[in-house]
Amino acid sequence: MNINGFFSAILAASLFGMIPTFTKISYGYQISPQLAVFTRYVLALILIIVPFIIYKNNYKIIKQKIFLLLLISLGSICLSTGLLVSVIFIPVSLVALIFYTYPLIVLGYSSIFGKKLNKIQIIGFFLAFAGLGLALGPNFETLNIYGIMLALLASIGAATILITNEILAKDLNPFTINAFVNFFCFLVLVLVIGINFDIDLNVPNLGKIYIFFASLFYCAAFFAQLIAVSYIGSTKTSLILYLEPIVAIISAIILLNESLTKIQTLGTIIVIFSLVISLRKNTNQLYSS
């Protein structure tokens, strides 16, 4: 496994894992989901525009890949909207459990299109998901079809991003992909907000700080994920991203004073163990690649 891809995926998982906690805290300071999404894409656009201009871009290839670029942008919209809105209807833990089925979607795609997956890798995927079921411990009595569908939409969006990016990475650099996605999503967001929503900026400064960092984490994590997929592919990247909910749990314990039950602790251990056994073969070859 390529060392750059490996550590990029670790970085993406760590930063993605911090987002739910910071976002939840910001909601306590009157930050709305609309403002959260708006801040996310505005900041991403600001951060990527200069590198995009400086970096040489082949606009002919961009035009040729426009469908895939629109598809990955749609995946980003589904991911952001699904996650931020689903928590209104169902518990965060249930949202997370449904959302983290996306590596299984990637695995299914890889299997259908003939990519070789060893038995350890397959076992690792399903073992990690089983561990998440214990670690996240959702209250299945609190069910809402809208929340479930939105969380599933986010999962499909995440899988779409990983799969599409693996194809795009063969011809386009991460700066180009990132810039296109964020610019397109920003335009869609402005259109939607202009028609249906108002953004209230009269909120406490502390809330703005938390949502700023949540957005910053997203920008860095999304870019790191693009780099990871370009080096090690979508399947291996999605497996490493199973670390994301573990980071989310730890950050919630530290910042939200949440605690883990014995079953949740066991689930966390299972997730970590599944990652170790799944990546062991590849990490042994890490420095030989």
Image (cartoon, grey):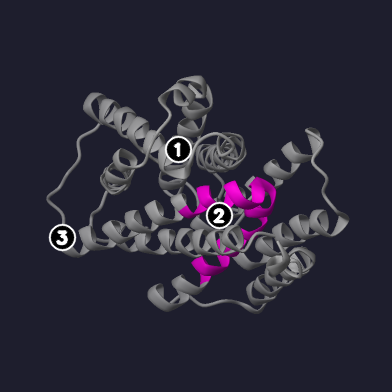
Q: Which residue matches tag 1?
A: 177
Query: Mark 2: which secondary structure?
Result: helix
**Which of the two discs, 3 and 1, labels the residue nearer the N terminus?**
1
How packed mark 3 is, by other alpha carbons closer than 10 Å (few <14, some 14-19, many 20 or more), is: few
Percent across and percent down for residue 112 are 79, 34
User: Is residue 75 positioned above or below 138 on the image?
Assistant: above
Q: Which residue matches tag 2?
A: 96
Image marks 2 and 3: residues in contact by CB distance under 8 Å: no
Magenta highlight on residue 116: no
Looking at the rendered structure, which numbered label has been put on residue 204? 3
Task: Name the quarter where the N terminus is drawn.
Answer: bottom right
User: Is residue 146 positioned above or below 214 on the image?
Assistant: above
- Residue 117 falls left or right of residue 263: right
* Residue at 68% from the left image edge and 66% from the top image edge: 134
**Magenta stretch: helix, strand or loop mostly:** helix
Amino acid type at mark 2? Ala
Percent across and percent down for residue 174 are 47, 44
Q: Is residue 34 visible?
A: no
Q: Is residue 171 visible?
A: yes
